Amino acid sequence: TRRYSIAAIPGDGIGKEVVPACLAVLQAAAARAGGFALEVTEYPWGSDFYRSTGRMMPDDGLATLRAHDAILFGAVGDPGLPDDLTLWGLRLAIAQGFDQYANVRPVRLFPGVASPLAGVDAAALDWVIVRENSEGEYAGHGGRAHRGLPEEVATETAIFTRRGVERIMRFAFRLAASRPRKHLIIVTKSNAQRHGMVLWDEIAAEVARDFPEVRTERVLVDAMAARMVLKPRSIDTVVATNLHADILSDLAAALAGGLGLAPTANLNPECRAPSMFEPIHGSAFDIAGKGIANPIGTFWSGAMMLDHLGEGAAAALITEAIARVTAAGLLTPDLGGTATTHAVTEAVIAAIEGRNA
Ligand code: NAD
Ligand code: MN
């Protein structure tokens, strides 16, 4: 039996509801697929931990996590604490500490889920957005001068390194080459951002020579936003910078039914450190504690985790079960239904176990 050690960090708000639900789904998929076992350790880190210790995670938190094969994360965010403290104190500390430079965001429309775009079906929306996750506009460099004075200036410097751009391009080309359509859109803004984005374009052209089977297009980020709405069928794999992909992937999630469904993987592709899997939504304190959070984005993230661990058959059991449950119309309120988190979880587990239609 193959054994995987999983760190589960529910975090704050609805993270505490969707992560336990996902763990039950993962165990059902492992039991059904057979051949492997998941050993889960839960860490109660986040805003409550901060209130009692003054830290979002212990000083040796990264060393503790490094011993695991993968991390399942919920969300952080608390109405009583600054968002940059909770985000940098836990989620970004892990993603940057483990150099999880490839952020993979699949987008698809599940049966029974309505897109806000008219006439869009599952065939029209089957994308993967690759987000550079370690540098660019979120490198954290900048400064402020003349605070509070009329001549105050603030800078926010985007940093693009040859190494950082080349590794995300190679990752995106490999992913595009593995998909049936072998098409990659390289999102850019090199007309206006004429240093970093020109380096981005040059490296894309260099890497493209190693992947002759992948068709590429360069599209400016503003035009890309319009294209996602107007010509969704023309899109397959997309690579974009940290900021551009952040914005485009929220638009993509909305087109595919909303934030509650969307998953993400923060990968260290060379497996030199654990990778982290999480829904893209936040702690949603407006609905926390009510038992109505949509757990599907977390289930799908759990499936991506199994895929990453090499358990593709068990991962497929989960995504197929999700599709059966949405097709049957069992939806949480964010999707227009009345089902609870618990009801959706039980139905997905039943579908994995082959107990319902
Ligand atoms: P949010 O994603 O928490 O919520 C946005 C809206 O979508 C809310 O109305 C919420 O109820 C709804 N929603 C989100 N996920 C849902 C789900 N699974 N089921 C049903 N409805 C869902 O974003 P926000 O309101 O901008 O932020 C709330 C807090 O979360 C903030 O503190 C923010 O900093 C934090 N946040 C954290 C992460 C993260 O941990 N990765 C991501 C985004 C926001
Ligand atoms: Mn975002």
Image (spheres, rainbow, N blue to C red):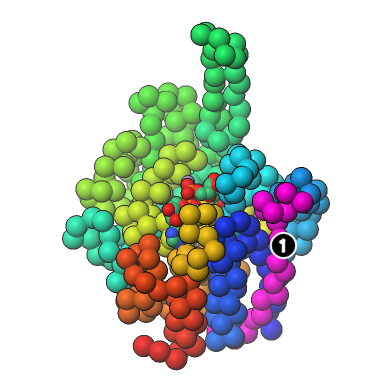
Residue 33 figure quarter: bottom right
Picture coordinates of residue 163 (x, y %)?
Answer: 59, 38
Q: Secondary structure at mark 1?
A: loop
Query: Relative to 229, does residue 22 appear above or below in the rendering?
Result: below
Residue sitting at 56 percent across and 82 percent down?
28
- Residue at point 64%, 81% (across, down): 36
Front residue of this view, candidates 42 and 133: 42
- If the image is split into quadrants, where does the C terminus sit? bottom left
Asked if one can make out residue 34 in the rendered structure from this viewpoint, the answer is yes
Horizontal and vertical percent for residue 142? 59, 24
For residue 46: magenta? Answer: yes
Camera-nearest residue between 156 and 166: 156
Identify the residue at image location x=42%, y=34%. Answer: 201
Residue at the farthest right position: 60
Start-end of magenta stretch: 33-52
Amino acid carrying label 1: it is Tyr
Please determine whether, in this image, residue 191 is positioned above or below residue 179.
above
Residue 143: x and y in percent read: 61, 21
Q: State how many labels appear.
A: 1
Q: Is residue 73 above or below residue 58?
A: below
Q: Is residue 313 visible?
A: no
Q: Verify whether residue 333 appears in magenta.
A: no
Q: Residue at 32% x, 36% y: name it.
A: 222
Q: Nearer the viewer, residue 25 or 17?
A: 17
Near mark 1 (Cα within 10 A), the count class, few <14, some 14-19 or many ≥20, is some
**Residue tagged 1:** 43
